[in-house]
């Protein structure tokens, strides 16, 4: 018997995560493109690190950071009387961290593909940096931003390693689709595991197909 709670939770976690990822990714890519700060190469490497490190390592690092004895965890307990570990917020945090590099790389590539003379022309006409960003930079880079959002959503939807480290597998609370698949398989309930595999495969295929279809229509129109 398939419980729909892991499906609903996975979509909820992925949706919230991509909101954070969008703003963090766009802001980071814009700052890295527009400024020449010291240690830029090291910072970019740090941004990309979650993409190459095993998710369980990311989960361990987050556990050290936001756990009860971690610096962030201690501050949250002391000043807000709350903890992130083993909550849905932990699942959102894990999804945000592991999917951030995809959004950052897509946004960075989109920004770098913009003809800077168009932005300079807007500045010459008196537009502020804020207006140039919203009326020139963002519209011209929108296809790249959408790609980053879709890929980040799909990555978060399939996240397992970091999630199980800091959110755990609590049915009805933190159990996402990948966790449900793993523990159903561990219990030798292959039918349930197979159903979850089909569900997550259909969801991810649909959003990737939708992205490719949308990009294909945009290319045709242009």
Image (tube, rainbow, N blue to C red):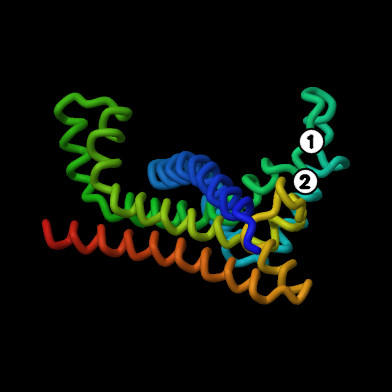
Q: Nearer the viewer, residue 166 or 132?
A: 166
Q: Is residue 158 above or below residue 83?
A: below
Residue found farthest to the right: 69
Q: Are circles 1 and 2 on residues that touch, CB within 8 Å?
A: yes
> Is residue 42 at all visible to an observer of this figure?
no
Q: Is residue 96 left or right of residue 116?
A: right
Q: Nearer the viewer, residue 69 or 201?
A: 201
Residue 115 at x, y percent in the picture = 21, 50
Q: Residue at x 77, y 73 (%)?
A: 186
- Residue at image mark 2: 86
Q: Is residue 222 above or below residue 31?
A: below
Residue 211 at x, y percent in the picture = 32, 59
- Residue at image mark 1: 83
When asked about the image quadrant of residue 121, the answer is top left
Residue found farthest to the front: 1
Secondary structure beneath dot 1 equals loop
Q: Residue at x 64, y 56 (%)?
A: 3
Residue 48 at x, y percent in the picture = 55, 58
Q: Nearer the viewer, residue 124 or 24?
A: 24
Considering the image in quadrants, where does the C terminus appear? bottom left
Marks 1 and 2, Cα distance to the nearest angstrom? 8 Å
Q: Residue at x 77, y 51 (%)?
A: 170
């Amino acid at each position: 018997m398939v419980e729909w709670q892991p499906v609903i939770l996975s979509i909820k976690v992925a949706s919230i995560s991509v909101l954070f990822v969008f703003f963090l990714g766009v802001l980071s890519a814009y700052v890295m493109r527009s400024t020449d700060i010291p240690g830029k190469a090291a910072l970019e490497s740090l941004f990309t690190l979650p993409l190459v490190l095993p998710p369980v390592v990311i989960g361990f690092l987050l556990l050290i950071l936001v756990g009860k004895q971690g610096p962030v965890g201690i501050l949250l307990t002391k000043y807000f009387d709350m903890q992130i570990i083993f909550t849905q917020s932990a699942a959102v945090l894990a999804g945000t961290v592991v999917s951030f590099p995809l959004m950052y790389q897509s946004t960075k590539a989109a920004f770098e593909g913009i003809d800077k003379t168009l932005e300079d022309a807007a500045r010459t006409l008196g537009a502020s940096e804020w207006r140039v960003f919203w009326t020139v930079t963002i519209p011209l880079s929108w296809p790249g931003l959408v790609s980053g959002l879709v890929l980040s959503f799909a990555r978060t939807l399939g996240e397992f390693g970091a999630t199980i480290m800091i959110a755990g597998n609590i049915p009805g609370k933190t159990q996402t689709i990948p966790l449900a698949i793993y523990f159903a398989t561990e219990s030798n309930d292959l039918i349930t595991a197979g159903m979850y595999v089909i569900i997550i495969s259909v969801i991810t295929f649909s959003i990737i197909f939708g992205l490719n279809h949308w990009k294909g229509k945009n290319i045709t129109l242009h």
